[in-house]
Image (cartoon, grey):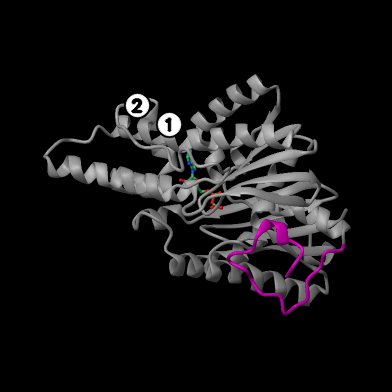
């Protein structure tokens, strides 16, 4: 265990956090959501520029809140991927500069490992464990037989679930990030629109969200062409039932197939109230322990990166200064960089 500064800049949150012997000392997040909302989604170039503007301030605040000097640090950790290439580079260059200046190791952290390990702030992992990773950029079921042992047993064959929420929200005229208003409005609606279940009848644990997104877009356009008004809460409910239903279906099948002891939710979409309640109901039926991350660590932050970094420090997983980012880094290759 050690004193580590962790940096996260993979998408639209600039974040820094300090952990000391496993205890979180600070967790600063500067979100760019208000800027990207104007465009209905994250604009990569703007994200990179805002990270560049904000990163030093966020790091300074994280160090001040932790009441530490840079000289006190044992290592600096950073999200190396997956994420937006330019955005990732800003965090990496900041981390490299600190590593070089203070002559401390540089720890490369996988973003999704971070989302999974965010749960360790509130629960103890029991293996074999199934991590249901549902975020803006990724959707996958990850089997863990031990710490830092990741096997991707299923993943989306096209879009991520969060991306699908965001696109559906846009066509319905709802603000970015779309998951939040859809979650809210679905509570006021009825499942009245018929949307086909993706990959129905196909023997696979994989998921798919591109067809669902297109079905909603086509349905909305057809209704508009006929001069009919879309009932937005009903569309939200109909869409959410299918989108979340697919995750629940795959989780149930995976739990049975791999005999897991514990299921954990991870990533931004794990904030979804319907996913949380349905998953709780279904895992209770299967008698499987379910852990749901607290709201503060569902979306991107550096505390989750710090948590993984503590483990990697003990394993001496350090990177050379010519480390590059990997926008498509796979979680089962977390130690290849
Ligand atoms: O994990 P995250 O912050 O970004 C990635 O690392 O990809 O997740 C952001 C995603 C967005 O797509 C957003 O719409 C979705 O999480 N999200 C939700 C909810 N809150 C955020 N999706 C469904 N229901 C929510 N309550």
Residue at 13% from the left image edge and 44% from the top image edge: 225
Q: Quadrant of residue 134?
A: top right
Residue sitting nearer the eye, 255 or 289: 255
Q: Are marks 1 and 2 in contact (CB under 8 Å)?
A: yes
Residue at 55% in and 46% down: 206
Residue under numbered circle 2: 191
Q: Is residue 188 above or below residue 100?
A: above
Pick whichever of labels 1 and 2 is earlier in the sequence.
Answer: 2
Q: Position of residue 71 (x, y in %)?
A: 83, 67
Name which quarter of the figure residue 189 lies in: top left
Q: SS at mark 2? A: loop
Is any part of residue 176 visible from this angle?
Answer: no
Magenta stretch in the rendered image: 316-337
Secondary structure that dominates the magenta span: loop
The residue that mark 1 highlights is 241
Q: How many marks?
A: 2
Q: Quadrant of the C terminus?
A: bottom right
């Amino acid at each position: 265990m050690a004193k580590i500064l962790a940096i996260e800049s993979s998408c639209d949150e600039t974040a820094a956090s300090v952990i000391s012997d496993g205890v979180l000392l600070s967790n600063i997040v500067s979100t760019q959501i208000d800027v990207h909302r104007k465009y209905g989604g994250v604009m990569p170039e703007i994200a990179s520029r805002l990270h560049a503007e904000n990163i030093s301030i966020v790091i300074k605040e994280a160090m001040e809140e932790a009441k530490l000097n840079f000289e006190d640090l044992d290592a600096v950790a950073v999200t190396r991927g997956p994420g937006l290439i330019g955005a990732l580079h800003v965090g990496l260059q900041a981390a490299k500069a600190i590593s070089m200046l203070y002559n401390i190791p540089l720890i490369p952290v996988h973003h999704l490992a971070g989302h999974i390990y965010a749960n360790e702030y509130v629960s103890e992992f029991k293996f074999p464990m199934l991590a249901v990773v549902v975020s803006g950029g990724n959707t996958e079921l990850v089997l863990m037989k031990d710490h830092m042992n990741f096997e991707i047993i299923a993943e989306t064959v096209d879009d991520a679930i969060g991306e699908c929420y965001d696109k559906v929200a846009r066509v319905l005229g709802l603000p970015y990030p779309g998951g939040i208003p859809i979650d809210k409005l679905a509570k006021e609606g009825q499942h009245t629109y018929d949307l086909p279940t993706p990959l129905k009848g196909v023997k696979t644990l994989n998921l798919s969200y591109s067809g669902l997104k297109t079905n909603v877009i086509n349905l909305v356009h057809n209704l508009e062409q006929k001069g009919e008004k879309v009932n937005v809460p009903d569309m939200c409910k109909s869409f959410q039932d299918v989108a979340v239903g697919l995750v629940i279906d795959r989780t149930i099948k995976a739990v049975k197939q791999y005999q897991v002891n514990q299921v954990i939710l991870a990533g931004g979409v794990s904030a979804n109230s319907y996913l949380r309640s349905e998953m709780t109901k279904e895992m209770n039926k299967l008698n499987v322990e379910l852990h749901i991350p607290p709201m503060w660590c569902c979306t991107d932050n550096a505390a989750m990166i710090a948590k993984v970094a503590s483990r990697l420090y003990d394993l001496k997983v350090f990177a050379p200064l010519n480390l590059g980012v990997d926008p498509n880094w796979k979680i089962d290759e977390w130690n290849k960089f």
